[in-house]
Amino acid sequence: MNFQSVYRLSFYLMLVLGACTLSLDVGDRALAPLYPIGVAVASFVAYVFVDERNRPLVPRDVGNLLALATVVLAFLDYNVSGDANLSLGHWLVYLQIVKILLPKNVRDDWSLILLGLTQVLIGAVISPSDQVGFLLLAWVVVSLWVLGLFALRRDSIRARALADKNLGATVSIIEAPASERLAPASLVREGPYAGLVDTPFLISTARVAITTLALGGIIFLAMPRRGAGASRRSAEPIASHLTGFDDQVKLGQLGEILENDSVVMSVESFDEQTGNRVELEGEPLWRGVTLGAYENGVWRRQSPDSATFPIAPVPGATKRRILRVQIKLEANDSNVLFGLRPMLEVGPDSLEAQLNPNDGTIFRENTRGGTIDYFIRAERADPRLQRGETLPTNPQRGALLGIPAKLVEPLRAVADPIVENIPAADVEGRARALEAYLRSSGQFAYSLQMKIDDPSLDPVLDFLVNRKVGHCEYFASALALLLRAEHIPARLVNGFKGGDWNSIAQVTNVRQKHAHSWVEAYLGGDEVHRPLWLTLDPTPGNQRDASVAKVGGFPANFRQFTDLVRYVWVFYIIGFNPERQQRILYQPVLALAREAARGFAIMGQTVKQWIHDLLHFPTVVSFFTIRGFVVSFSVLLLIAAGLRAAHWLARRLWNRFSGETRDDGALLAGVVFYRRLAHLLAGYGLSRPASETQGEFARRAAVFLAGKGLETEDVADVPAAVVDAFYGVRFGRQTLELDTLRALESRLDALEAALDATRAH
């Protein structure tokens, strides 16, 4: 495969990867994969029918009309999708396909590179997922390779044009037939850089790419960030729907995401006192929505008219352990934020997070935006108490005790035998007993496979008395209604439980399969009239854990690696904000600089004292000693070395900025003469190996010609004369005069005639 084929195939691969960034993670859009496929097909057709044959597949006028037609396609795309960014990216793909099918010069290649770069930028904005991160890395590596080949191809085209131009000028000067010249154009008929793409070239290219990526990474990390950290990314996200976290949730809906391995949020946790990363104990409950009203298998959230207020830090210091949890929530269309109870603060301020004081949920007003960055300060204290939550009013208590009339007696029939020996005043004891009945009695089993035994019954009652198999929603719903049947106010909570801990990155990845439902039972108020809510989880833990482990299918070791890559992408590329930059880069560097400054200060004082002692001569007599001689000699030596270096530098600068400009025509002439000499001698079995210099070759050629006889003895000095001229223009910045050119041409003609004469004999 020649250089041109390697360049074109690599170029088209870069364009296909760029188009792919517009098709990954863009929701349920069936036409999305067609765009990279279209670029790939157009590239194949162009490689076979346009690039190899160097002729257009369609006339350029037709291509211009097709380019205008792409505007109409982009407008139709926008009317269908409603996403201006994505439609702009697709329009660039249409233009790219048209341009691919036309013959391409250097300027056309530049245009295609810029179109592909813009597509990649749009793809990174509309879909900041880790999948795009993998693709972006591949595109960068391929692009570096293509840009290197592009530079070589452009220079070869320029060199060929310049060689043809200057060769014509030189031939006209020396008035010799072109057939006698070894023209540079003849050296490139088989394509530029023949044999270039070999193992050493690939290794050097990889080294350049690695160095470029490393330097780019250093610049990316060190470049100062503005602002206090973005809480939302991208104005028009392609957000997925998070099932089970709406104002109304039908029983069984949560099961739709329990078999999905997609990441919902990535979590870093720190001990606020020490600043060290910590792994959260057990399986933390990431609280989401609270559901209060139940009827016919449907749960509804409490009234949206409830008062809200921003969560603020609790005044005064606390002696309890506080965790700072940094959460990156993937783009979704819900206003729900997830957190650990009890929460002290939610930030940053730009997020405008709010707390519903009636149900303890946190949310954001604006559901637009991509990935959400926020933090939670959680107190490791009594989980029953959430600061800022208010006591339920009588109507709210009534709602938390509400049971469909047809379910009251059947539910009491199940609950009464379980709690009959526990006093009514022991609310927590009765609640724990009902939780244990569902969780560990052995009568119920966990499963994601749902079926209805008796369609005429309420789904919760059917679960309790008939099938006794279900997932967490059924267990939590059954417990909430059983508690209400025993006059204990209760509410259902949908959120997430646990997550995948990555020991390498020390981050928790919470996936959709970790979605979970549990119950909070109302225990009354404390001494300062704050509500106490008891968290109950009736789902059999071991069975749920086994079910969660089956979802995904990746081996544990490979999962650690993919999660590590995702962590780097999420937190240190698209989420590399000023706070994170200060913590991981600037603060350690500043601390190291302060330590180094202190160390250098001590060293400076020592050196200063040593120099003072060395140069201090209290009397004139003390100077005329061995120490005085050594000091004076060393100072004079340093002065001489400094003057010498200054003179050398000044001379180099003068030669560089005031030297004569080389004549490219003369330089080419010197090269042509040398190549003609090499060509003539090669015809007689005398060639220069790569290990031999031109000067050594000239001396060996002189001996060769002197030994051929009288015919060649008179021209034995020609190789040395030609090589001297070649050295002068190639390395000595000399300009060959017209008389010199004529003389060299005449001597080469004499050499050729002498060699022809020896061949005739």
Image: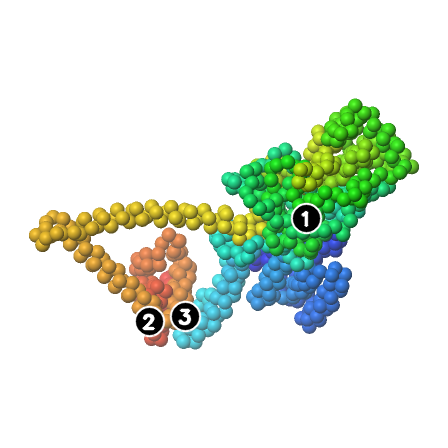
Pick out the residue farthest to the top. 421
Residue tagged by mark 1?
A: 355
Which mark is in front, 2 or 1? 1
217 lies left or right of 711: right
How far apart are the two marked residues, 2 and 3, measured between alpha carbons? Answer: 18 Å
Residue tagged by mark 3?
A: 664
Could you say where residue 431 lies in the image, as x and y percent from the top left? 75, 31
**Marking on residue 270:** none
Check the image and tell me how it is coloured: rainbow
Which quadrant of the view contains residue 360? top right
How far apart are the two marked residues, 1 and 3, measured between alpha carbons? Answer: 76 Å
Q: Nearer the viewer, residue 191 or 434?
A: 434
Q: Residue at x 34, y 47 (%)?
A: 598
How far apart are the two marked residues, 2 and 1, measured between alpha carbons? Answer: 74 Å
Q: Quick one: label 2 or label 1, which is nearer the N terminus?
A: 1
Q: Nearer the viewer, residue 401 or 60?
A: 401
Q: Quick one: label 1 or label 3, which is nearer the N terminus?
A: 1
Could you say where residue 293 lies in the image, as x and y percent from the top left? 81, 43
Could you say where residue 446 lies in the image, as x and y percent from the top left? 77, 31
- Check disc 3 and report its element: helix, strand or loop: helix
Is the residue marked by circle 1 packed among few (<14), some (14-19), or many (20+) residues within 10 Å?
Answer: many
Q: Residue at x 59, y 58 (%)?
A: 11
Residue tagged by mark 2?
A: 658
- Check disc 2 and report its element: helix, strand or loop: helix
